[in-house]
Image (spheres, rainbow, N blue to C red):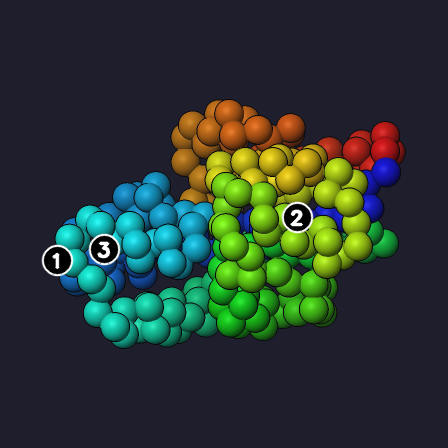
C-alpha cells in the first residue's frame, strides 16, 4: 500500500524553472559566456548548485568569482519574491490527499526551499518534511535523496509515489524503487519532454495535477 507521496519542488510545487533559469542565464552571460533561457533549462535544470557551478566553470575554462553563488541566490530570491507562483493545481492535489504522508525531495538548497515555501505560503503543508540533495552524498539522478526522504519519513521506498518533472529526478526516484509520476504541468515544459520522462523510467505521465490526482487515486486503491 502506498503510504507516502514525495514531491520534487521546482517544476512540481513551485513554477520556478523559468524564473530561476532566466536569472541564471543572465548571470552566466555577464561572465562572458552567452546563455539563453532555453540553454539554461536544457543544461542545468534538476541539478544541485555544485553541479551547476562545475558545469559553468568547465564551459568558461576558469573558476567562478568567489561571490557568484551567493550573488546568484540573492538575485534569484529577489525575483522569486516578485514573480514566483505555484504550479497550477498543486494546492488542490495536496488537499485531495491530506490523509497521506507527504514530503519534499529536492535538488535545491534548504534556505532556498524554506524561502520559496514561505513565498508560496505552503510551509504548513510540509512542516519539517523538506529534504534537500545537499543532505546526501549524490544528487539526482542517483537515488540518494529519495532513499533519504523515505527513511526519514519511516516508509519503505517501494511504498512511495514520487512526482517529478525532470528526467534526472524521474531516474532517481525510479532507482529508489518508488512509483513515479512524471508531471508536465509547469511552464518550462517543452515539446518532447513527455518522451524524455518516459525514457527516464516514469511509470505514469500526467499533463496536469488533475490527471496526477486520478493516477494517484488509482494507485492508492490498488496498493
How far from the left and from the top, in percent, is residue 137? 52, 55
The answer for how far apart the CA atoms under marks 3 and 1 are is 12 Å
Can residue 47 be seen here? The reply is: yes
Q: Which mark is residue 40?
A: none
Marker count (numbered): 3
The quadrant of the rendering that contains the C terminus is: top right
Q: Name the residue located 71 percent from the left edge and 69 percent from the top edge.
A: 127
Residue 188 % position (x, y): 43, 45
Tell me which label, 3 or 1, sits earlier in the chain: 1
Between 60 and 23, the one lying in front of the other is 60
Few, some or many C-alpha atoms within 10 Å of disc 3 (few <14, some 14-19, many ≥20)? some
Q: Quadrant of the N terminus?
A: top right
| Residue at 38% from the left image edge and 69% from the top image edge | 73
For the residues labelled 2 and 1, the Cα–Cα distance comes to 39 Å
Q: Secondary structure at mark 3?
A: helix
Q: Is residue 214 above or below residue 65?
A: above
Residue 57: assigned label: 3
From this view, report whether residue 70 is shown above or below residue 16.
Answer: below
- Residue drawn at x 45%, y 40% is 189
Badge 2: few (under 14), some or many (20 or more) residues near its Cα, within 10 Å? Answer: many
Separation of marks 2 and 3 at Cα, in angstroms: 30 Å
Disc number for residue 147: 2
Which residue position holds label 1? Answer: 32
Q: Earlier in the sequence, mark 2 or mark 3?
A: 3
Where in the figure is residue 133, as x and y percent of width and height? 53, 56
Amino acid at each position: 500500500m502506498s503510504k507516502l507521496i514525495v514531491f520534487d519542488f521546482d517544476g512540481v510545487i513551485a513554477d520556478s524553472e523559468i524564473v530561476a533559469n532566466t536569472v541564471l542565464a543572465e548571470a552566466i552571460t555577464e561572465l562572458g559566456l552567452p546563455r539563453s533561457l532555453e540553454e539554461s533549462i536544457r543544461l542545468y535544470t534538476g541539478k544541485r548548485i555544485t553541479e551547476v557551478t562545475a558545469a559553468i566553470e568547465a564551459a568558461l575554462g576558469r573558476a567562478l568569482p568567489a561571490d557568484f553563488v551567493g550573488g546568484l541566490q540573492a538575485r534569484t530570491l529577489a525575483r522569486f519574491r516578485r514573480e514566483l507562483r505555484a504550479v497550477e493545481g498543486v494546492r488542490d492535489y495536496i488537499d485531495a490527499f491530506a490523509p497521506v504522508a507527504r514530503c519534499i525531495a529536492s535538488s535545491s538548497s534548504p534556505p532556498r526551499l524554506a524561502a520559496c515555501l514561505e513565498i508560496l505560503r505552503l510551509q504548513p503543508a510540509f512542516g519539517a518534511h523538506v529534504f534537500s540533495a545537499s543532505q546526501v552524498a549524490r544528487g539526482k539522478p542517483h537515488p540518494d535523496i529519495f532513499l533519504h526522504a523515505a527513511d526519514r519519513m519511516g516508509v519503505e521506498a517501494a511504498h512511495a509515489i514520487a512526482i517529478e518533472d525532470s528526467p534526472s529526478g524521474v531516474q532517481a526516484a525510479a532507482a529508489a524503487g518508488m512509483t513515479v509520476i512524471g508531471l508536465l504541468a509547469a511552464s518550462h515544459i517543452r515539446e518532447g519532454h513527455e518522451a524524455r520522462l518516459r525514457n527516464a523510467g516514469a511509470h505514469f505521465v500526467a499533463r496536469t495535477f488533475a490527471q496526477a490526482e486520478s493516477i494517484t487515486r488509482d494507485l492508492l486503491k490498488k496498493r
